[in-house]
Image (cartoon, rainbow, N blue to C red):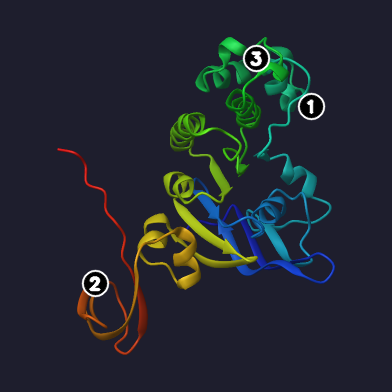
Amino acid sequence: MAEALLSLRDIRVRYDEPTVLQFASLAVYPGEVLAIIGPNGAGKSTLLRLMGLLQQPTEGKIYFHGDEVTQKNALAIRRRMASVFQEPLLLNASVYDNAALGLKLRGLDWRSTEQRISPWLERLGIAHLAQRQARSLSGGEAQRTSLARALSLNPELLLLDEPFSSLDPPTREGFLIDLETILRDTGITTVFVTHDRNEALMLGDRVGVLIGGRLLQLGPATEILSRPKNQEVADFIGVGTKIAGVVEEATSGRSRIRVEAGNIEVAGNFRPGERVLLAAQAIKRKQE
């Protein structure tokens, strides 16, 4: 496996006495979209602040391209990242000026700034709004402006903190589709936190389930959905009927599970005698 772009090890975050975030390790690999899902108060935003080097852990270390992040190099590393937050952070200025703010702060000349900004305004469907004042934008237009500002920085790591949560469903759906296309086309390494399972499964190459400050499961999106690690994960991701059983036989990637109503054969490598929880989900069929 490739070297991690960003990794966090032996992390603990405490505010006064309560521990709000604790896990042994988490890595983000170049080119992937890592989606973190969890309920409100799970520690998702705290995790994203750690990744963006906006907050230090109470315990543990953070590494960027294998080098430990320290007070000396944190600012330089932070400039290689970009963030989009739940609420758009826009100045009382035009869409163009807001999108160009990051580049201006980095001292880019106006011609180079325009060459970087204009394609993103066009790609995100807001080029016609370039001279409009930010205060007159809809929620979706404002969030697209924030995303244009982040993408124009050519970040090595893009951090998205529930950017769709305040948008109405039609706006959110259109934004999700556009963002998915952009992330696939550009290959920008991205961490995306949300409480919405469908958003995570649509965007994420891997999905982590964060509940109560603990990273309960991490893996491919299909694995999280089809094989939740425990009852807590299954309940949160909204699987359907759950059936307890015991593995009777396991051979060649298939297992026979004894349940109350009889035996069920499933795909998967289990150990005979192992207690399992089967999750049955409804499957939507396409209209012929």
Residue 29 visible in rendering: no
**Residue at image location 53% in from the left, 23% down from the top:** 124
Crowding around mark 2 (Cα neighbors within 10 Å: few <14, some 14 to 19, many 20+) is some
Q: Is mark 3 on a helix, strand or loop?
A: helix
Mark 2 against mark 3, which lies toward the viewer? 2
Foreground pick, 196 / 240: 240
x, y percent for residue 123:
51, 21
Which numbered circle lies on residue 114? 3
x, y percent for residue 81:
67, 41
**Quick check: marks 2 and 1 in contact, CB under 8 Å?**
no
Foreground pick, 273 / 187: 273
Q: Name the residue under label 2.
A: 266
Residue lying furthest left: 288
Q: What element carries label 1?
A: helix
x, y percent for residue 268:
28, 72
**Residue at image location 57% in from the left, 33% down from the top:** 167
**Residue at image location 48% in from the left, 39% down from the top:** 187
Residue 113 visible in rendering: yes
Crowding around mark 3 (Cα neighbors within 10 Å: few <14, some 14 to 19, many 20+) is some
Number of numbered labels in the structure image:
3
Inspect the image, locate mark 2, and give the three-letter code of the amino acid beneath it.
Answer: Val
Q: Name the residue under label 1.
A: 105
Inspect the image, locate mark 3, and give the three-letter code of the amino acid beneath it.
Answer: Glu
Nearest to N terminus: mark 3 or mark 1: 1
Foreground pick, 22 / 189: 22
Which numbered circle lies on residue 207? none
Residue lying furthest bottom: 273
Q: In this view, does 4 lie to the left or right of 177?
A: right
